[in-house]
Image (cartoon, coloured by chain):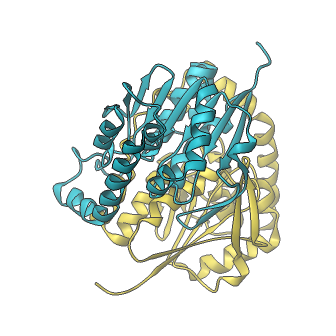
Chain colours: A yellow, B cyan
C-alpha cells in the first residue's frame, strides 16, 4: 500500500453542536494513515454546549486538506455571516478531494456557493432551506453527489463518517472501526425522525426550536442574497 | 412540575475515548432541568484522541451529584491505578442516585468496588474482565441493576443516555432529544458486534488491540487484588 496520509480538517465555530464533529472525529481517528486537524477562524478555544475545545488551529494556517468537514449547530447562522470563516471554507473546499458536512453544516456549504445544483442532506428541521442555495434537499441519512458528501442531523455524522472511511480506506477498515466503536445502535425509542416520532414529541421539538428556526431562516435568506 | 435540578458529573481522565462521554453529554445537555459538570482528578485540560477538553473542574471540588457517569477508553488502565481519581469516584458514587458508566468505564466502577454482585455492560472486548470485580458481565447494550446503569462500547453511550433521560425526565422528553439529534441510526455495515462482523474484520481488530487488551487485563487483575 502507498504511504499516503489523508488530511482531514474539521472547520468548527462557536455554537457548533459538538456531537456533529466529535462523532465523525472518533470514527476517523481510527482510520489508518489519517491526520485530523480541528480548526476555527481564529483558533484557540471553542465553546459548545458547555464543553470547551482548546488548542484549535487557525483555518488560515492550514495550507490544504484532502477532506473538509463542516459540522452544524445553533452557531450555523452566525458562521454563515462570518466572512473570514466563509472565505476559509471556500479556499479549503477548492483544493479538497471531498467537501463534506454534517447536520446544518450543509447550510454553510450552501452559503459558500458549494452546493449549486447538488443534492445534499441536512438536519430534518432545516433541510428545506437548502433550496435557497440552489441545492436539492435529500432526506437520506448520508448523501453523495460527486465529491460532496453530506450527513443528516447530528448523529448522522457517525453513519457519514463510516461511509467516508469506507470510501477512503476500504470497507474492511471501516467495518473494523465500527466494531471497535461497538456501533450496533439500539435506540430505546423510535423517535429519531419527524415521521416516526409521536405527534406530541414533534410538536414539543418544534415549540422548543421555533425561535432558532426563524433566526436560521433569516440568516439563510441573507446568505443566499450575498451569493 | 417541581423546580429541581439534576446534577450530572462526567468523571474523565487522560486517554478517555471522547465519544464515550461526548455522546451522552450531547444527549443530556438537552434534558430539561439538568446541570452538567465535566471533571477530572486534577482539573484543567484532558487530551483524548487529539482533542483537548479544557476548563475541566476538579472532582474534589464537586460536593455531590445526582448522576455519576464514568466513560471508558485506553486510559482506563491508568485511571484504575490513580488512587486520587478512584477515591473521588467512590465518594461521588456514595451520594449519587445513579452510578453509571459507558464502555470500559464499568471496569473503573468495578475497581472502585461498586459492582460486586451486579450485572453490568462493558465494551465487548473487555466485558469478561468484569468478573474479576465480582460483577456479572451482561452483553446487553444498556444494563440496569438497581441504581447502576451501564452501557456497552463507545457508541452505546448514546443509547445509554437516552435510557437515562427517560428514567429521569420521562419518555416524552427523551424522545424529543432523540428527534432533535435525529437519532435514527443507519450504519452502512452490520459490523458493530463480534457476532455480526466478518471474521476477517474481527481478526483485524483483535490484532490491532492485542497489546492494549493484555495491558488492560494486567491492570484489572492488579485493581481486583487491591479490593
Q: Decide which of B84, B122 is in the foreground and name it.
A: B84
- From where the camera sits, is residue A142 visible? no
Q: Position of residue B129 (x, y in %)?
A: 31, 43
Instruction: Say which quarter of the image contains residue B174.
Output: top right
Q: Residue at x 49, y 34 (%)?
A: B160
- From where the camera sits, is residue B140 visible? yes
Q: Is residue B214 left or right of residue A68?
A: left
Considering only vertical position in the picture, is B227 above or below B223? above
Q: Residue furthest left?
A: B199
Q: Residue at x 19, y 54 (%)?
A: B198
Q: Decide which of B177, A51 is in the foreground and name it.
A: A51
Q: Decide which of A92, B136 is in the foreground and name it.
A: B136
Q: Residue at x 57, y 26 (%)?
A: B98
Q: Residue furthest top?
A: B1
Quarter the N terminus of chain A occupies:
bottom left
Considering only vertical position in the picture, is B127 above or below B208? above
Q: Is residue A78 left or right of residue B214?
A: right
Q: Position of residue B184 (x, y in %)?
A: 47, 38
Quarter the C terminus of chain A occupies:
bottom right
Considering only vertical position in the picture, is A2 above or below B147? below
Q: Position of residue A190 (x, y in %)?
A: 46, 28
Q: Is residue B9 left or right of residue B197?
A: right
**Number of numbered labels in the structure image:** 0
Instruction: Say which quarter of the image contains residue B118.
Output: top left
Instruction: Say which quarter of the image contains residue B123.
Output: top left
Q: Position of residue A157 (x, y in %)?
A: 52, 53
Amino acid at each position: 500500500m502507498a504511504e499516503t496520509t489523508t488530511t482531514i480538517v474539521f472547520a468548527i465555530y462557536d455554537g457548533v453542536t459538538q456531537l456533529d464533529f466529535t462523532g465523525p472525529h472518533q470514527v476517523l481517528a481510527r482510520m489508518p494513515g489519517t491526520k485530523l486537524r480541528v480548526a476555527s477562524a481564529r483558533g484557540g478555544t471553542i465553546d459548545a454546549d458547555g464543553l470547551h475545545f482548546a488548542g484549535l488551529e487557525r483555518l488560515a494556517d492550514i495550507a490544504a486538506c484532502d477532506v473538509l468537514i463542516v459540522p452544524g449547530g445553533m452557531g450555523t447562522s452566525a458562521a454563515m455571516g462570518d466572512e473570514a470563516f466563509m472565505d476559509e471554507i471556500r479556499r479549503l473546499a477548492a483544493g479538497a478531494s471531498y467537501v463534506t458536512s454534517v447536520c446544518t453544516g450543509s447550510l454553510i456549504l450552501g452559503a459558500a456557493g458549494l452546493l449549486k445544483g447538488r443534492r445534499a442532506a441536512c438536519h430534518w428541521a432545516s433541510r428545506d432551506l437548502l433550496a435557497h442555495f440552489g441545492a436539492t434537499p435529500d432526506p437520506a441519512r448520508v448523501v453523495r453527489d460527486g465529491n460532496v458528501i453530506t450527513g443528516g442531523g447530528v448523529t448522522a455524522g457517525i453513519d457519514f463518517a463510516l461511509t467516508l472511511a469506507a470510501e477512503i480506506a476500504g470497507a474492511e477498515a471501516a467495518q473494523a472501526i465500527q466494531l471497535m466503536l461497538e456501533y450496533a445502535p439500539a435506540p430505546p425509542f423510535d423517535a429519531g425522525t419527524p415521521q416516526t416520532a409521536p405527534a406530541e414529541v414533534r410538536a414539543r421539538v418544534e415549540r422548543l426550536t421555533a425561535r432558532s428556526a426563524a433566526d436560521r431562516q433569516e440568516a439563510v435568506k441573507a446568505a443566499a442574497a450575498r451569493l
